[in-house]
Image: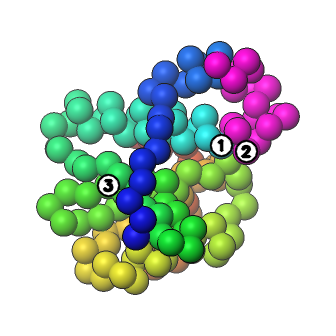
Amino acid sequence: LVKSEKIYFHDTMLLCHLLQSTPEDLAKSQPGRFGHVLENFVLSELTKANHTSGDNVDISFYRTNDGREIDFVLERQHKLVAIEVKNAENITDKDLAGIKELQQATGKDFLCGIVLCNTPRVIAYDKDIYLLPFNALWQ
């Protein structure tokens, strides 16, 4: 594992302002950048839920030397939930490489992997890996 930091804006509209665009325009013209804005938004929602629930969940990310990454890893009492954010509806095994690697490396401590994406409903994709629509953040 590589120790490094990521910088996030908890105010995604401020981020869009700094990018001189709107979320809608970014989604259409710069989907890669929009993905980063979406990742910032998800972290903001996870942080709010963590603070209001009082669960004291550690939120970090996972990145290997060869570049596999998971956007967010939630850890509580040595149990892990991996969350990947994708601005896509069609998810492939390649999109899940980081989650599957963490799942294999952590064994029974891995509770589940979640891909937040543009799917219209919850889909059980693989063993303990689920695709969830973005509105699941508020349910």
User: Label 1 belongs to which residue?
Assistant: 35
Mark 2 and mark 1 in contact (Cβ < 8 Å)?
Answer: yes
Q: Is residue 88 magenta?
A: no
Up-down relation of residue 55 to residue 47 (above or below)? below
Residue 74: x percent and y percent? Answer: 32, 55
Q: How far apart are marks 1 and 2 (CA)?
A: 5 Å
Q: Nearer the viewer, residue 68 or 48?
A: 68
Q: Does residue 7 appear to the left or right of 110 in the view shown? A: right
Question: Crowding near pointer 1: few (<14 within 10 Å), some, many (20+)?
Answer: some
Residue 129 visible in the displayed image: no
Mark 3 and mark 2 in contact (Cβ < 8 Å)?
Answer: no
User: Label 2 belongs to which residue?
Assistant: 32
Q: In the image, what residue type sits under mark 1?
A: Gly
> Residue 97 lies in what quarter of the image?
bottom right
Q: Which mark is residue 74?
A: 3
Provide the residue span drawn in magenta: 18-34
Q: Residue furthest right?
A: 29
Q: Does the magenta stretch mainly form a helix, a strand or a loop?
A: helix
Residue 49: x percent and y percent? Answer: 31, 35
Question: Crowding near pointer 3: few (<14 within 10 Å), some, many (20+)?
Answer: some
Looking at the rendered structure, the secondary structure element under dot 1 is: helix
> Residue 137 lies in what quarter of the image?
top left
Looking at the rendered structure, the secondary structure element under dot 2 is: helix
Earlier in the chain: of badge 1 and badge 3, it is: 1
- The residue sitting at 20% across, 36% down in the picture is 53
Q: Does residue 71 appear to the left or right of 112 in the view shown? A: right
Residue 56 visible in the displayed image: yes
- The residue sitting at 40% across, 83% down in the picture is 104
Up-down relation of residue 94 to residue 121 (above or below)? below
- The residue sitting at 45% across, 27% down in the picture is 10
